[in-house]
Amino acid sequence: MLDSIDKVGERRRRAAELIESLMKLLRSGWSPWVNIDDNRGYTLLSDALDKYEKSLDKLPKLKTRQSYGSRLNVLREYIASLVLPPRYVYQYNASFVGDFLDWLYLDRDVTGRTRNNYRGWCSALATYFIEREYMSSNPVEKIKKVSETPKKRKPLSSAMLGQLRKYLSVKDPIFLLACMMEYYTMIRPEELSNLRISDISIKEQSVFVAAEFSKNKRDGKVGLNDDIIMLMLDINLFSHPGDFYIFGDKLHQCTTKASSEIFRRQWIKVRKALHWSDEYQFYSLKDSGIRDLANSQGIVIARDQARHTDVATTNKYLQGRDMPVHVETKHFKGAL
């Protein structure tokens, strides 16, 4: 490139200028192996992340928006901590994501489950970049999950369930209904917060969960236990208009929707009153319900009531001692 310059001194001066210019480009993230003419990889990573953040507003569930937004903030925190932070989207590669996950797992000491959840989110972010042609492949596919420790959450014993019912029958019948719904219907807290009185059918003794609020994005209908119907009648639930939320603001029947966090906050108060450890969570009621229904009526019925796609998912909620035993195995006449 410098052959046209006759004087050696001028040629060296021009070479030094080119070297300095190229070094600045390299330090800022430029790569001679990325073709800027036909690749959008040179989009600023900060701009791409800003666009991704705006796209989160379109997600239907508030909890999902908050979760993804929180993880995005943690990623930005990590980028800001780097001496040479990535500048362009093409630098969002396996090495960068791997270092980010190691930072979470080793430096911030998150659990294996949390680290794997971040890995899933990083993969979703890469998919977002691919859809917008910032990159052509997902770098997170090269990164493996780490082993996870068992869930901290424990199911409630029969004695604890009886204690809970006795306490709430006097102190808070409305929250008792929420607990019974979680135990008997296995409806997720986010779905529970979206249920309206019109979703209940006394005739069919069922509750309808719309696809709009369902985790699996499908309409679903599950049975209501006799005790739930009786409690609904006792608290005069059906004296309110059908468009009222069953668990609205402050757990009252009203037209104001409450956050699903309302169940967790109320549960913590009850747990303290009953002197239980934090291993017992509101979602423990679902674990307990699946266990008891599977042992009583079979795992297939428990699967359908929990609206799981297969028995393998239902099995994840059952600890070894809770697994149902097939009656047929007890009376099988073998050859030995």
Image (cartoon, rainbow, N blue to C red):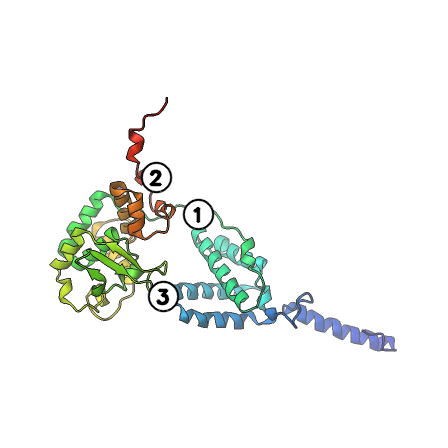
Closer to the chain start, of discs 2 and 3, is: 3
Q: Residue at x 18, y 46 (%)?
A: 162
User: At label 2, which amino acid type do we have?
Assistant: Gly
Residue, disc 1:
148
Residue ID at (19%, 66%): 253
Closer to the camera in the image, 162 or 196? 196
- In the image, what residue occupies the spot 52% across and 58% down? 100
| 285 and 25: which is toward the camera | 285
Q: Earlier in the sequence, mark 3 or mark 1?
A: 3
Q: Nearer the viewer, residue 297 or 96?
A: 297
Q: Mark 3 belongs to which amino acid?
A: Lys
Mark 1 or mark 2: which is in front? 2
Separation of residues labelled 3 and 1 (CA atoms):
27 Å
Q: Amino acid at mark 1?
A: Glu
Sequence order check, earlier mark of 1 and 2: 1
The residue under label 2 is 320
Q: Secondary structure at mark 3?
A: loop
Q: Residue at x 37, y 58 (%)?
A: 216
Residue 153: where, in percent of width, then height?
A: 33, 49
